[in-house]
Structure formats: C-alpha cells, structure tokens
Image (cartoon, rainbow, N blue to C red):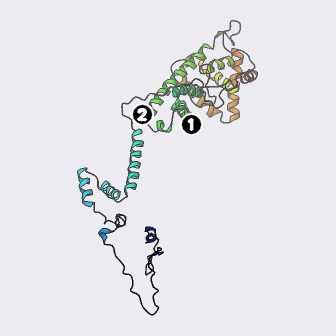
C-alpha cells in the first residue's frame, strides 16, 4: 500500500501515475503486452469547495473603490482640495506604507510644535549660559581691537556670535531659531554690558589718584598701567587669561579719556567711540595706529607710574597660564 509520502513525492507531470513500490504479499501484476494498449488512469479534479484553504488565498480580491467614502470624509472634516487629493493617495498605499506615512507626519508635527512658544511665555535662561554670558561680556569689553563700546551695539553682536560658536554653552540652534528666547538673551546681554561698562569706568576713574604735590605732571596714589589692567581682569578672571601689552595700551587710552572731567558723565562711552573712530580715520595703517596707542601708553607710564610692561606681561603669562585653553571653563558649572 502506498504511503502519504509516496503521494507527496509523485511526479504530477507524467502519466500514468504508479505507486513507487509494491508491498510484499500482493498479487503480481502481469506485464502488459506491447501490442495491447492499456486504459489511461483517469485524472481526478477536486472541486473548488474541497480544495485546501491556502490555495484559495492566492486569488486577488478586486480593488475596492473608496472614492465615495473619501469624499464624504473630506466634506465632514472640511478638508481643502489639496488635502483631499493627498488623502486619496494615502488610501492607495498598503497598510505598512500607511503606518510609515502616519509616523512621519507625527514626527513632523512634533518638530514644529517644539519651535512654538506662547507669546507671553517667559524663557528662563539656563544658569550655565548666564555664566558664559558674564565671561563673554568682559572678554569683549577688554578686547584691545574692539572698534566701539556702544555704537551699533557692536559688543552685543560680537558676544552673541561667540555664544553661537559654542553651542555647548547653551545657545543651541533650537534656541537661536526661537525669536522669544533670543530676545530674552539679547535683553539680558544688554543689561550685562551696561553693568560691565559701569564697573570698568569706575575702576578707570578711581585709578587716576591725585595730583602729585611736587610734580603736577604726575599722579600719586594711582595704579600703574599693569596694575590697572590686572584690576580690570579680576572683574571676571575667566574672561581674559592674563595681561598683555596690547591690553595695557588700550586701557591707557581708556584712562586718558576717563581722566578728562568733561568725559566722565553719562556720555563717556559715546565720546570714547567717537575718539576711536577719529583715530582710525587719521591713522589708517597698522603701523600708525600702533604708534598712536604706543605713545598714549608711554605717557601713561610717566604720569601714573613707571613699570617695565613687557617684563611684567611675561611674568604674568608665565605664572598665570590659561587654565582652560579653549576658554571653556566648566569647573564650577551647574
């Protein structure tokens, strides 16, 4: 008797179909005479209703027309024509593709919502960013090449550029793209610059001292230029690593302006900016502008105290090496 495996292993492309073996004990089948034809084994067709279920699943169902349902849905949700067309295209995708499209839409919505802030929402500037703003503010004001201290908000622009170049400090692209947050940061930065200019001006005026009783061309109880530069750096020790000759020359220029009584009022920084512009117009080459500031530094040393600036600078740079070469001091950040 044939087994199930015999039928599974049958070659359905050939005829007639015979079992692969004859069990022992069965009567032998006489050989067929070559001259006599044998009757073919009839082919049996299974009715469709008796065929295995897996076979019937291979048939494709006709595509359903959802246009009426889509139109009704679009009307009920008051969709625009373009949205209705997009909904129609969506309905023609496979279920898997539809899930991917829905996930993409949700991610896009989430990204857009993250950029939206209520009009009256108050942005709390992170403490880490506030510390960096303090440092950057003094670094900009003590920059010997700063072209203006007040005009066109040049200090503010330079400070924001420095903060943007160091996104790890807190001014990320997301913050930069939010108008409300950038307005808060810029407003805080302006207040810090007002405070910084006030503190610097106070040190400049107090460093002048009093006229020397024996020599009207000199001052007593005053700070020499290196001491004054050191005092300005201590306003925020992380802003500038150490005193430099260039800084001493710029500070001498600032003190010269502050020593004039007519300049010590509320318009001091405006007058100072005007003097800087005038100097740059008159001395237009690096050599001449360097001589201009060099002469002011030379006279400052005679008036407020002689000191070997170059040696003092070398000593300070040797003893006070930059603790944070990249200017990113994270030692006491929250």
Apparent side of residue 59 relative to residue 192 in the rendered image (left or right): left
Which residue is more in the foreground, 103 or 255?
Answer: 103
Which residue, given by chain and number where applicable, does mark 2 sit on? 180
Q: Position of residue 128 (x, y in %)?
A: 53, 27
The residue lying at 71 percent from left, 6 percent from top is 214
| Residue 259 visible in the shown view | no
Apparent side of residue 184 relative to residue 205 in the rendered image (left or right): left
The residue lying at 36 percent from left, 67 percent from top is 55
| Residue 4 visible in the shown view | yes
The residue furthest bottom is 35
Which residue is more in the foreground, 290 or 179?
Answer: 179
CA–CA distance in space, label 2 to label 1:
20 Å
* Residues at circles 2 and 1 in contact by the CB criterion of under 8 Å: no
Examine the image and state in which quarter residue 40 appears.
bottom left
In the displayed structure, would residue 59 be above or below residue 291?
Answer: below
- Characterize the local packing of mark 2: few (<14), some (14-19) or many (20 or more) Cα atoms within 10 angstroms: some
The residue furthest front is 25
For the N terminus, the image quarter is bottom left
Which residue is more in the foreground, 186 or 247?
Answer: 186
Q: Position of residue 61 (x, y in %)?
A: 32, 65
Q: Earlier in the sequence, mark 2 or mark 1?
A: 1
In the displayed structure, would residue 138 be above or below residue 74?
Answer: above
Please give the label number shown on residue 247: none
- Characterize the local packing of mark 1: few (<14), some (14-19) or many (20 or more) Cα atoms within 10 angstroms: few
Examine the image and state in which quarter residue 297 appears.
top right
Apparent side of residue 70 relative to residue 230 in the rendered image (left or right): left
Q: Position of residue 127 (x, y in %)?
A: 50, 25
Q: Position of residue 86 (x, y in %)?
A: 34, 56
Which residue is more in the foreground, 298 or 310?
Answer: 310
Which residue, given by chain and number where applicable, does mark 1 sit on? 165
């Amino acid at each position: 008797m044939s087994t199930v495996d015999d039928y599974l292993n049958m070659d359905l492309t050939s005829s007639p179909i015979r079992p692969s073996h004859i069990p022992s004990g069965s009567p032998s089948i006489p050989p067929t005479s070559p001259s006599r034809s044998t009757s073919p084994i009839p082919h049996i067709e299974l009715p469709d209703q008796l065929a295995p279920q897996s076979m019937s699943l291979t048939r494709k169902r006709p595509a359903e027309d959802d246009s009426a349902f889509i139109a009704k849905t679009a009307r009920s949700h008051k969709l625009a024509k373009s949205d209705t067309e997009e909904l129609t295209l969506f309905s023609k995708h496979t279920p898997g593709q539809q899930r991917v499209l829905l996930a993409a839409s949700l991610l896009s919505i989430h990204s857009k919502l993250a950029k939206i802030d209520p009009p009256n929402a108050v942005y709390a500037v992170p403490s880490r960013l506030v510390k960096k703003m303090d440092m950057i503010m003094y670094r900009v004001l003590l920059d010997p090449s700063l072209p203006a201290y007040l005009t066109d908000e040049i200090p503010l622009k330079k400070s924001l550029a420095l903060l943007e170049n160091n996104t790890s400090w807190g001014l990320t692209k997301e913050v930069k793209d939010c108008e409300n947050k950038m307005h808060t940061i810029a407003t805080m930065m302006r207040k810090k610059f007002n405070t910084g200019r006030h503190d610097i001006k106070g040190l400049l005026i107090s460093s002048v001292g009093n006229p020397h009783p024996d020599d009207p061309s000199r001052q007593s109880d005053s700070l020499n230029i290196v001491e004054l530069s050191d005092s300005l750096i201590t306003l925020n020790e992380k802003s500038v690593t150490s005193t430099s000759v260039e800084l001493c020359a710029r500070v001498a220029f600032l003190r010269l302006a502050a020593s004039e009584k007519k300049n010590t009022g509320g318009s001091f920084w405006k007058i100072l900016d005007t003097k800087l512009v005038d100097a740059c117009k008159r001395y237009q080459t690096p050599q001449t502008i360097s001589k201009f500031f060099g002469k002011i530094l030379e006279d400052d040393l005679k008036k407020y105290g002689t000191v070997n600036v170059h040696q003092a600078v070398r000593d300070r740079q040797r003893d006070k090496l930059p603790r944070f070469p990249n200017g990113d001091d994270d030692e006491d950040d929250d």
